[in-house]
Amino acid sequence: MCFLAIMEAGWAVSMKRDPIIRELADSIEGCQMRDRRRFRRRLRRLKGRGDAKARTNGLKKLRGHIEESLDLVEKRRQLVPGELLTSDLPVLKAQHEIQQALQANQVIIVCGETGSGKTTQLPQIAMRAGRGIFGLIGHTQPRRLAARAVAQRIAEEIGPDGQEIVGFQVRFRKQVKDHALIKIMTDGILLSELATDPKLEQYDTIIVDEAHERSLNIDLLLGCLHQIVQKRPELRVIITSATIDSERFSEFFGGAPVIEVPGRQFEVEVIHAESGDSEDDPEVMASAVQEAMDQALVKHPREGDVLVFLPGEREIREVARVLHGPFGNEFEIVSLYARLSLAAQQKALKPQRRRRIVLATNVAETSLTVPRIRVVIDSGLVRVKRYSARRGIERLPVEGVSKASANQRTGRAGRVAEGTCYRLYSEGAFQKRDDFTAPEIMRTNLASVILRLADLGLGEVETFPLLDRPRPQAMRAGRETLWELGAIDEQSRLTGTGRSMARMPVDPRLARMLLAGQEHRCLADVLVIASGLAIPDPKIRPEGEEAVADQRHAAFRVEGSDLLSKRTLWEAWVERVRAGGTSSQRRWCQSNSLSWVRMREWREIHDQLHRMLREMGIHVSGRSSPAEAVHRALLSGLVTSVGKLARPSAQDGNAKFEKGMYDGPGRRRFKIHPSSGVRSIRPDWIMSAEIIETNRLWARSVAGIDPVWIAEAAPHLLEPEYGDPEWDAVRGSAVTTQRRMLAGLLLPGTRRVSYVVVDPMVARRIFIDEGLVRRDLQLEAGFFKRNGVLQEEIERRE
């Protein structure tokens, strides 16, 4: 009999002997799931306690906690509405099938088209099937905006007790009562709870909504649930998808049943642009939207609202500005994107008396339902997170949406009646689009994924269950990046630095810079520069005006450092923001050849990172710091992007030597980009925030550095190179010269070290030959002197 079985048998005998223990043990089985294991452990400890008084007091206290848990279970049970769901939403036609599938299976897949009602009805179906009593029904959404809106909608549908039954949690805000049955949250919130609740025992049901979006959080969450359901047979998981790709999810969970739910959809006429593809220039985009609005008013002169899909906030602002003049009297123009305030989000989701034009990012594609839409105008563009290996930073370029996303957008025009979708790209361009958006895990820097898995104790990315396995090269590159940044050690274990970086929801390189900024007491400046590195360069050089633009940009230039030039530009921009409104800011940017949109984006990212640091308890001083401290901190995130000015050598042979070339780690050779203010100075050593390849490799955002800083920033990356051994009579040992290399790049400076660290056997032989035999050893030891006298005596006799 195994040890566990013996323990269980002993526990059963103990309960038979002690009726109080038996009573409490039985009561525990009716408690909340999150309490049961903890209560059992306490009861087991009390059973073996010898002190009768302490045992009695402990049992009394435990009984009180058990009763509190039982009361909470009973309160939840009483809150469950008695009436059946009677809405005409398509998903309710399958509610009995869904409930039966939940009883028979741990995991089910619900594939529902747009308008099926799966987002708001599935938690209620699960609740009426008896779920949510012993643990919460957790319902995840990809975005904060959707989480709040869904919670509010479900609470309204439930009725007077809705606010008691339904709660929500997003970053910075939590409203979940102890007796709530349903908790709506972002997938990121549920992932973060794994750190303190590895089996998610506070939940008895988890619904992962919009799984087809395949964000990084969703893929990681699905992998965690794949592991957890094997340890918790009572847990139920519902995966929802709005696409026909549901079989992938079914296979991942061992053949989980798929329940198809039809959508409630009216016919939508699709009108493509005559030719061309989507334009990502905000002004061109705004003009195209205005033309589509003119056409829409001919087909729908009085009825319904308009939903315009745009890639980001800056495009929303530009389109709103252009539309306000011709359409501002007839329409209310509102925005809808993730970072809006709660009041602004609710305004976009509630229909008003006037017709509305809703300018939205892809949050309105599947996560949220904007009511009363009859016309959709689709720019065909979206901001997609991609990792640039050369730049080493996460970027959000604007790209064309997939066919699946385009069709989801089109469907939004047919929710209440027949509608029209105007696509600002041709049908030919549509046919060339990808069928589905590539999963985020296949197009992102895996360093952040590996960091998160290590922080949560979920193992290696190679063995973690994932729907799509990243390429081995990508996994190796991610791990190498973390090693370079000091986030993991040689055994891929998280370091103290890595744990701090894991708490920052930003690219690991930027996180490393920010931590180093705190270490070097220059965090305010590093925050400015790091947020500036996260956007495209705001400096513009209009055709034919390049010389004028360069002259304007020179006003912000700091000699020897493009990175400090960003600080100077930022200070001027902040002063302008404080001094005037939007019109004044636009004029200032235009007069300085700067992109107003990118300057606004820079400020938004800066403020977001500032808030994040405050949450971590890290104070950001407003004082400006010395240049050396700032450069040292930035180098911590850019240590593999350094370069040494190349000099002519015999190895060049007869080849013509090209001035201004730099040798970098990994035997890369590059030049400083012509746009850099450092190009004319040509420092001996530089670091670069970006290395790009066109007709050659170029370094951009460059700063001169002292190579001594490299060894201080990343000593673990340096490899020694040794010269030939020689005898040192003063030291009494063989020595050699040591130089240090960074991925093949020789750093300046040498030092003399003992040859024992290179080859102990050779060092020993040299010691015997030179020190003992030839007596070239400055040693005062008695044995050495006696040996010398004896050696002279032998030589004299010979």
Image (tube, rainbow, N blue to C red):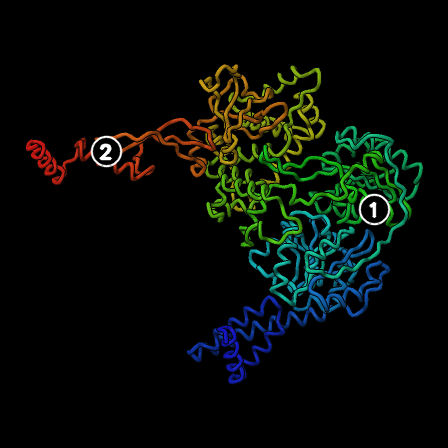
User: What element does badge 2 sit on?
Assistant: loop
Dot 2: within a 10 Å radius of its alpha carbon, few (fewer than 14), some, or many (20 or more) residues? few
- Left or right for 305, reference 223: right
Q: Residue at x 55, y 51 (%)?
A: 460
Q: Position of residue 264 (x, y in %)?
A: 86, 53
Distance of mark 2 from mark 1, alpha carbons? 82 Å
Q: Which one is in front, 160 or 375?
A: 375
Q: Are there few (<14), some (14-19), or many (20+) residues within 10 Å of tag 1?
A: many
Residue at the spot 66% in from the left edge and 40% down from the top edge:
385
Earlier sequence position, callout 2 versus callout 1: 1
In what element is the residue under mark 1?
Answer: helix
Q: Which residue is tagged 1?
A: 412
* Residue 624 visible at all: no
Give the camera-side residue of 650 and 39: 650
| Residue 765 in the figure: left or right of residue 646 | left
Q: Are marks 2 and 1 in contact (CB under 8 Å)?
A: no
Q: In the rendered structure, which amino acid carries the disc numbered 1? A: Arg
The amino acid pointed to by label 2 is Arg
The answer to whether residue 642 shows anywhere in this view is yes
Quarter holding the C terminus is top left
